[in-house]
Image: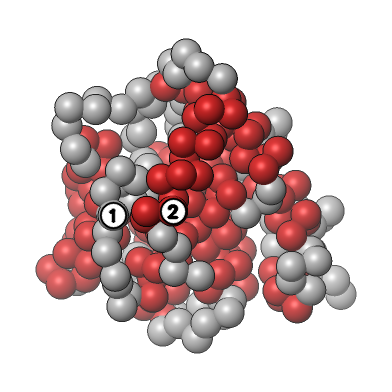
Amino acid sequence: MRQYIFEKSYPSLDYIVLRWPKCRHVIAKYALSNYIKPDLLKVSKACLNSLNFYKKDPLLLVIKDLTKKCSKNFTSNKYHDQHHFKAVLVISCLFAKFYKLKDKDKILLIIIALTHDMNHQGKRIISHQFYQEKKTTNELRRMVYKKLLNRITWIRVEKIILNTYFPVNPGVSDDIVEKIILDSDIASSTLFGFLNGLKLSKRLKNEIGFNEKSITLYKNFLNLIKSRKLYF
Protein backbone atom coordinates (compact mmCIF):
# COMPACT_ATOMS: atom_id res chain seq x y z
CA MET A 1 0.00 0.00 0.00
CA ARG A 2 1.34 3.42 -0.92
CA GLN A 3 2.00 5.72 2.02
CA TYR A 4 0.98 9.36 2.09
CA ILE A 5 2.03 11.97 4.59
CA PHE A 6 -0.19 14.97 3.88
CA GLU A 7 -2.79 14.34 1.21
CA LYS A 8 -3.42 11.61 -1.33
CA SER A 9 -1.62 13.54 -4.07
CA TYR A 10 1.61 13.74 -2.06
CA PRO A 11 4.07 10.89 -1.36
CA SER A 12 5.71 10.15 1.97
CA LEU A 13 8.69 12.12 3.22
CA ASP A 14 10.77 8.92 3.00
CA TYR A 15 10.05 8.88 -0.73
CA ILE A 16 11.00 12.54 -1.04
CA VAL A 17 14.20 12.22 1.03
CA LEU A 18 15.43 9.33 -1.10
CA ARG A 19 14.93 11.44 -4.21
CA TRP A 20 16.10 14.76 -2.81
CA PRO A 21 16.63 17.32 -4.28
CA LYS A 22 14.85 16.10 -7.43
CA CYS A 23 11.58 15.98 -5.43
CA ARG A 24 11.91 19.52 -4.13
CA HIS A 25 9.04 20.63 -6.34
CA VAL A 26 6.70 18.23 -4.50
CA ILE A 27 7.37 19.91 -1.16
CA ALA A 28 7.21 23.33 -2.81
CA LYS A 29 3.75 22.66 -4.23
CA TYR A 30 2.39 21.70 -0.82
CA ALA A 31 4.29 24.17 1.37
CA LEU A 32 3.58 27.24 -0.75
CA SER A 33 -0.08 26.59 -1.53
CA ASN A 34 -2.46 28.85 0.39
CA TYR A 35 -5.77 27.95 -1.21
CA ILE A 36 -6.90 25.28 1.25
CA LYS A 37 -6.63 25.74 5.01
CA PRO A 38 -4.24 23.05 6.26
CA ASP A 39 -5.15 20.52 8.91
CA LEU A 40 -2.25 21.28 11.24
CA LEU A 41 -3.13 18.43 13.59
CA LYS A 42 -2.98 15.97 10.70
CA VAL A 43 0.30 17.44 9.46
CA SER A 44 1.85 17.36 12.96
CA LYS A 45 0.87 13.73 13.49
CA ALA A 46 2.09 12.80 10.01
CA CYS A 47 5.44 14.42 10.72
CA LEU A 48 5.81 12.58 14.02
CA ASN A 49 4.97 9.29 12.31
CA SER A 50 7.47 10.05 9.57
CA LEU A 51 10.12 10.60 12.26
CA ASN A 52 9.17 7.23 13.80
CA PHE A 53 7.99 8.84 17.01
CA TYR A 54 5.69 6.40 18.78
CA LYS A 55 6.55 7.10 22.40
CA LYS A 56 3.86 8.12 24.87
CA ASP A 57 4.89 11.63 25.79
CA PRO A 58 2.95 14.18 27.89
CA LEU A 59 3.44 16.76 25.12
CA LEU A 60 1.25 14.69 22.80
CA LEU A 61 -1.68 15.68 24.98
CA VAL A 62 -1.34 19.37 24.06
CA ILE A 63 -0.70 19.08 20.32
CA LYS A 64 -4.41 19.16 19.54
CA ASP A 65 -4.86 22.41 21.50
CA LEU A 66 -1.75 23.91 19.94
CA THR A 67 -2.84 23.13 16.38
CA LYS A 68 -6.27 24.55 17.12
CA LYS A 69 -4.67 27.75 18.38
CA CYS A 70 -2.30 27.98 15.40
CA SER A 71 -5.15 27.41 12.94
CA LYS A 72 -6.69 30.74 13.90
CA ASN A 73 -5.61 33.96 12.22
CA PHE A 74 -7.08 36.73 14.34
CA THR A 75 -5.00 39.47 12.71
CA SER A 76 -5.66 38.30 9.11
CA ASN A 77 -1.96 37.84 8.41
CA LYS A 78 -1.02 37.20 4.80
CA TYR A 79 2.33 35.56 5.55
CA HIS A 80 2.57 34.53 9.22
CA ASP A 81 -0.49 32.31 9.07
CA GLN A 82 -1.38 28.60 8.99
CA HIS A 83 0.43 28.16 5.69
CA HIS A 84 3.71 29.44 7.12
CA PHE A 85 3.33 27.11 10.10
CA LYS A 86 2.59 24.25 7.68
CA ALA A 87 5.68 25.06 5.59
CA VAL A 88 8.05 25.25 8.58
CA LEU A 89 6.59 22.02 9.99
CA VAL A 90 7.16 20.13 6.76
CA ILE A 91 10.63 21.54 6.09
CA SER A 92 11.72 20.89 9.69
CA CYS A 93 10.57 17.30 9.39
CA LEU A 94 12.34 16.98 6.05
CA PHE A 95 15.64 18.26 7.49
CA ALA A 96 15.22 16.02 10.55
CA LYS A 97 14.98 12.96 8.31
CA PHE A 98 18.68 13.38 7.55
CA TYR A 99 19.62 13.12 11.25
CA LYS A 100 19.10 10.62 14.04
CA LEU A 101 17.18 12.61 16.62
CA LYS A 102 16.32 11.45 20.12
CA ASP A 103 12.61 10.97 20.80
CA LYS A 104 12.48 14.07 22.99
CA ASP A 105 14.08 16.12 20.24
CA LYS A 106 11.51 14.89 17.72
CA ILE A 107 8.48 16.00 19.71
CA LEU A 108 10.11 19.33 20.64
CA LEU A 109 11.01 19.93 17.00
CA ILE A 110 7.41 19.48 15.84
CA ILE A 111 5.97 21.63 18.61
CA ILE A 112 8.44 24.48 18.08
CA ALA A 113 8.04 24.36 14.29
CA LEU A 114 4.28 24.53 14.73
CA THR A 115 4.16 27.31 17.30
CA HIS A 116 7.24 29.48 16.66
CA ASP A 117 5.03 32.34 15.37
CA MET A 118 1.85 31.53 17.28
CA ASN A 119 -0.38 34.59 17.83
CA HIS A 120 1.71 36.60 15.38
CA GLN A 121 0.56 40.21 15.38
CA GLY A 122 1.33 40.92 11.73
CA LYS A 123 3.11 44.25 11.55
CA ARG A 124 5.96 44.06 14.05
CA ILE A 125 6.53 46.73 16.72
CA ILE A 126 10.04 47.68 15.60
CA SER A 127 10.92 49.59 18.79
CA HIS A 128 10.56 46.44 20.89
CA GLN A 129 13.04 43.65 20.12
CA PHE A 130 11.61 40.15 20.52
CA TYR A 131 8.11 41.61 20.96
CA GLN A 132 6.46 38.93 18.82
CA GLU A 133 8.67 36.10 20.04
CA LYS A 134 7.91 36.91 23.67
CA LYS A 135 4.19 36.96 22.95
CA THR A 136 4.61 33.52 21.44
CA THR A 137 6.64 32.10 24.31
CA ASN A 138 4.28 33.55 26.93
CA GLU A 139 1.31 31.82 25.30
CA LEU A 140 3.21 28.59 24.70
CA ARG A 141 4.43 28.48 28.29
CA ARG A 142 0.87 28.82 29.51
CA MET A 143 -0.23 25.89 27.35
CA VAL A 144 2.66 23.43 27.67
CA TYR A 145 4.84 24.17 30.70
CA LYS A 146 3.21 21.59 32.96
CA LYS A 147 3.73 18.94 30.27
CA LEU A 148 7.44 19.77 29.78
CA LEU A 149 8.26 18.33 33.20
CA ASN A 150 11.37 20.43 33.88
CA ARG A 151 12.61 24.01 33.71
CA ILE A 152 15.69 23.13 31.65
CA THR A 153 13.55 21.92 28.75
CA TRP A 154 11.47 25.09 28.83
CA ILE A 155 14.58 27.31 28.80
CA ARG A 156 15.73 25.40 25.71
CA VAL A 157 12.39 25.86 23.92
CA GLU A 158 12.22 29.55 24.82
CA LYS A 159 15.77 30.17 23.59
CA ILE A 160 15.07 28.58 20.21
CA ILE A 161 11.91 30.61 19.63
CA LEU A 162 13.55 33.88 20.70
CA ASN A 163 16.39 33.16 18.27
CA THR A 164 13.93 33.06 15.36
CA TYR A 165 13.90 36.86 15.70
CA PHE A 166 15.50 37.53 12.36
CA PRO A 167 17.33 40.87 12.87
CA VAL A 168 19.55 39.35 15.58
CA ASN A 169 22.28 36.83 14.75
CA PRO A 170 21.82 33.92 17.21
CA GLY A 171 25.47 32.87 16.94
CA VAL A 172 26.77 29.32 16.85
CA SER A 173 24.58 26.59 18.32
CA ASP A 174 25.23 22.93 19.17
CA ASP A 175 21.50 22.22 19.58
CA ILE A 176 20.33 20.16 16.58
CA VAL A 177 16.68 21.14 17.14
CA GLU A 178 17.61 24.83 17.15
CA LYS A 179 19.67 24.43 13.98
CA ILE A 180 16.79 22.75 12.15
CA ILE A 181 14.18 25.27 13.34
CA LEU A 182 16.21 28.37 12.49
CA ASP A 183 17.15 27.07 9.05
CA SER A 184 13.63 25.83 8.31
CA ASP A 185 12.11 29.20 9.19
CA ILE A 186 14.42 30.84 6.65
CA ALA A 187 14.26 28.00 4.13
CA SER A 188 10.48 28.30 3.94
CA SER A 189 11.16 31.49 1.94
CA THR A 190 14.33 30.47 0.08
CA LEU A 191 14.33 26.72 -0.55
CA PHE A 192 12.07 26.76 -3.58
CA GLY A 193 13.74 29.31 -5.81
CA PHE A 194 13.70 33.04 -6.38
CA LEU A 195 10.26 33.30 -8.01
CA ASN A 196 8.55 31.43 -5.17
CA GLY A 197 10.45 33.56 -2.65
CA LEU A 198 9.14 36.60 -4.45
CA LYS A 199 5.56 35.34 -4.12
CA LEU A 200 6.04 34.91 -0.38
CA SER A 201 7.54 38.39 -0.14
CA LYS A 202 4.38 39.75 -1.73
CA ARG A 203 2.34 38.12 1.04
CA LEU A 204 4.66 39.56 3.69
CA LYS A 205 4.59 42.96 2.00
CA ASN A 206 0.80 43.01 2.26
CA GLU A 207 0.97 41.89 5.87
CA ILE A 208 3.41 44.53 7.12
CA GLY A 209 2.34 47.37 4.87
CA PHE A 210 5.65 47.58 3.00
CA ASN A 211 5.30 50.36 0.41
CA GLU A 212 8.10 49.40 -1.97
CA LYS A 213 8.21 46.55 -4.50
CA SER A 214 8.17 42.92 -3.36
CA ILE A 215 11.53 42.30 -5.03
CA THR A 216 13.09 45.01 -2.85
CA LEU A 217 11.79 43.32 0.29
CA TYR A 218 13.03 39.92 -0.84
CA LYS A 219 16.48 41.17 -1.83
CA ASN A 220 16.82 42.88 1.55
CA PHE A 221 15.91 39.56 3.18
CA LEU A 222 18.51 37.67 1.12
CA ASN A 223 21.18 40.20 2.06
CA LEU A 224 20.39 39.80 5.75
CA ILE A 225 20.76 36.03 5.45
CA LYS A 226 24.40 36.50 4.46
CA SER A 227 25.20 37.99 7.86
CA ARG A 228 23.00 35.58 9.81
CA LYS A 229 24.34 32.44 8.09
CA LEU A 230 22.68 29.03 7.81
CA TYR A 231 23.67 25.78 9.48
CA PHE A 232 22.85 23.42 6.60
Residue 8: image quadrant is bottom right
Q: Which amino acid does label 1 sit on?
A: Asn
Spatial CA distance of label 1 from label 2 is 11 Å
Q: Report the residue marked by disc 2.
A: 226
- In this figure, which colouring scheme has been used for the structure? secondary structure
Residue 157 visible in the picture? no
- In the rendered structure, the answer to whether residue 74 lies left or right of residue 86 reads left
Tag 1 secondary structure = loop
Q: On the rendered structure, is 10 left or right of 109?
A: right
Q: Can residue 27 be seen in this view?
A: yes
Q: What crowding class fits label 2: few (fewer than 14 Cα within 10 Å), some (14-19), or many (20 or more)?
A: few
Q: Which of 135 and 126 is in front in this view?
A: 126
Q: Which residue lies furthest to the right in this view?
A: 1
Give above or below for 177 relative to 79. Answer: below
Q: Indicate the secondary structure of the residue bearing disc 2.
A: helix
Question: Which corner quadrant holds the N terminus?
Answer: bottom right
Residue under the point 21% across and 41% down: 130
Label 1 vs 2, first from the N-terminus? 1
Res 177 → quadrant: bottom left
Residue bearing mark 1: 169
Residue at image position (31%, 78%) is 174
The residue carrying pointer 1 sits among few (fewer than 14), some (14 to 19) or many (20 or more) residues within 10 Å by Cα, namely some
Q: Is residue 7 left or right of residue 1?
A: left
Which mark is on residue 232? none
Choose mark 1 or mark 2, whichever is in front. Answer: 2
| Residue 226 in the figure: left or right of residue 171 | right
| Residue 196 in picture, x, y percent from top left | 68, 40
The residue under the point 44% across, 50% down is 225
Position of residue 195 measured from the top left corner of the image (x, y, whole percent)? 70, 38
Residue drawn 37% across the image and 42% down it:
117
